[in-house]
Amino acid sequence: MTDRQLVVGAGPVGRHVAALLAARGAHVTVVTRSGRDTGVAGVRHLALDASDADALSAAAEGADVLYNCANPGSYPQWERVWPPLAAALQTAAERSGAVYALTGNLYPYGPVDGPMTEDLPDAATDHKGRLRARMWADARTAFSAGRLAGAVEVRSSDFVGPGVGGNGHVSRVVPAALAGKRVTMIGRTDRPHTFTDVGDAARTLVAAAEDAGAHGRTWHTPSNAPVSQVQALTDVLASAGRPPVRVGSLRGAALAGVALVSPMMRELRELAYQWERPYVMDSTAAQERFGIAPTPWAEVCRRTAQG
């Protein structure tokens, strides 16, 4: 094995994956449209439009694993940006012979009753969830047909941890809360909800990609016991020695009103079911398969507070 790794995307998961691989001495290339430096030592950065299948295939030549850690813009852009990008990523993996490892989320399941396990059907009710479900279905089909050397998807719940920033429902309000200001969260703030440490997502994605017996299916990132949005924020603040703050809730008619004028809020409203009922992810299977335990909650909160 040459230990050549191609990471597409330099968001929170992509940076953590690149750092893990580089730390062990792998030859890591991170692809972004701008080629910006991730700050990860020992990593090559390549400016490339990843939706260009030919250019991405050339970059993937000789790679052992192609990591799909892309996060293309805001939700209103997904239907335009994701299909050609997903097609190019899979094509590059097929042509190069690389294992295709996808960073996934829980959207494909849609509204659920009870804890989410990997054997649930993909039954999304919104276009974002259906889109993500198609991406994995296409990769799984290509793997079953022998066109991909390997394919695996690791699904996570809402990210917390270092570098998440505006990409997380809790992280986005942390700066204001640290300043003692009132904050607003979407949906009910008292329902149990699973939060996933972004570093744990990266660790699980790398482990799954390198375990051939784990391919052909999805896995859930090992995550801590669920807590409410308010409790998660309160724990983050406590880790920094700060008191709780007032938390408002944007839901129902108020959320519908904002959605009338904000395309992004319209997209978020489609996912509001995640906050109106318990939203709990079971990660037992991955913990047992890969021997990965979630980062202790206290440490997750401390790193979330530090940004």
Image (cartoon, rainbow, N blue to C red):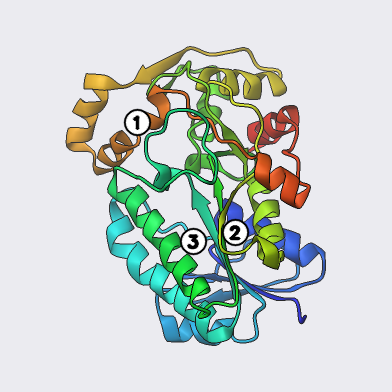
Residue under the point 54% across and 34% down: 171
Q: Position of residue 282 (x, y in %)?
A: 59, 36
C-alpha distance separating marks 3 and 1? 23 Å
Residue under the point 47% across and 24% down: 278
Q: Position of residue 197 (x, y in %)?
A: 64, 40
Residue under the point 68% across and 18% down: 238
Give the secondary structure at mark 3: loop
Query: Which residue matches tag 2?
Result: 14
Crowd tier of the residue under label 2, counting other residues whose Cα lies within 10 Å: few below 14, some 14–19, many 20 or above: many
Which of the two residues, 169 or 218, is positioned nearer the viewer here?
Answer: 218
Q: Are marks 2 and 3 in contact (CB under 8 Å)?
A: yes
Q: Position of residue 213 (x, y in %)?
A: 69, 64
- Which badge, 2 or 3, is on the more N-terminal residue? 2
C-alpha distance separating marks 2 and 3? 8 Å
- Considering every residue shown, the one lying at the far right of the view is 24
The tag on residue 9 is none
Instruction: Classify residue 272 as left or right of residue 257.
Output: right
Nearer to us: label 3 or label 1? 1
Query: Which residue matches tag 1?
Result: 272
Query: Which residue matches tag 3?
Result: 70
Q: Indicate the amino acid at tag 3.
A: Ala
